[in-house]
Image: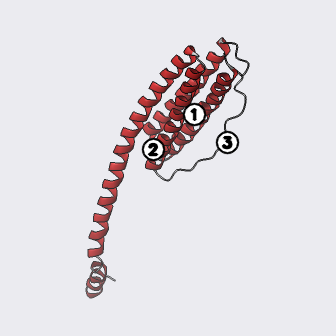
Amino acid sequence: MEQCIASALNKQILAELDAASLYLQMSSWLEGNGLKDFGGRLRRQAHEEAGHAVILFNFLKERDAATATASGSVRRREHSFASVKDVMDRLLAQGKHISANVAELIRLARGERDADAAVLLAWFSAVQLEEEEMVTNLLLRVSRWYRDAVGKLRDIDAELAKRQGTIPALLNSQKRHGVA
């Protein structure tokens, strides 16, 4: 195996582990905000990303690649999320980032005529596209819900604005009847 491919795959191992870490943080935030099933889905996704790292690691080891040591480290990042939509936006962005990495790895493998790596990476690409489609659909549904919820909140806000005069009227009524 060419050293450039081994090195690039080793970087991808770290990218997969980094994604797993991010997804666990998202899972924790979602579960902490009462969305157990959303959080559970991202926990499973984190497990899948870690599994991708292991697949790449094993691929390198089976080819006696000197860099099959997962050298380097996963970035330590603390994330805060503003909403479920924010989580979903970041999830989609992360998926697209990984997809771009995989596409570049495929180009590299083809350029180096490493058919085994190209086949493995084509599988990764298919998995990424499937995941992006699922996240895109969820994001559309979450975005629609947020838009509808904001509209409903504006309706309630307008209704409350019309009732501004009712509190003084109630107080006057209570004073007239000796309650206040």
**Looking at this view, is 118 or 137 the one in front?**
118
* Image quarter (top left, top right, bottom left or bottom right) of the C terminus: bottom left
Name the residue tied to disc 1.
20
Name the residue tied to disc 3.
76
User: For the residues marked 3 and 2, what is the alpha-carbon distance in whole angstroms?
Assistant: 21 Å
SS at mark 3? loop
Could you tell me residue 49's position as x and y percent? 55, 29
**Looking at this view, is 141 or 177 the one in front?**
141
SS at mark 2? helix
Q: Residue at x 50, y 30 (%)?
A: 44
Neighbor class of circle 2 (other Cα within 10 Å; few <14, some 14-19, many 20+) is many
SS at mark 1? helix
Neighbor class of circle 1 (other Cα within 10 Å; few <14, some 14-19, many 20+) is many
User: For the residues marked 3 and 1, what is the alpha-carbon distance in whole angstroms?
Assistant: 12 Å
Is residue 93 visible to the viewer in this orientation of the structure? yes
Amino acid marked by disc 2: Met
Please tell me which of labels 3 and 1 falls first in the chain: 1
Could you tell me residue 75's position as x and y percent? 67, 40
Amino acid marked by disc 1: Ala
**Looking at this view, is 105 or 147 the one in front?**
105
Please tell me which of labels 1 and 2 falls first in the chain: 1
Could you tell me residue 70's position as x and y percent? 69, 26
Name the residue tied to disc 2.
88
**Image quarter of residue 28:** top right
User: For the residues marked 1 and 2, what is the alpha-carbon distance in whole angstroms?
Assistant: 15 Å
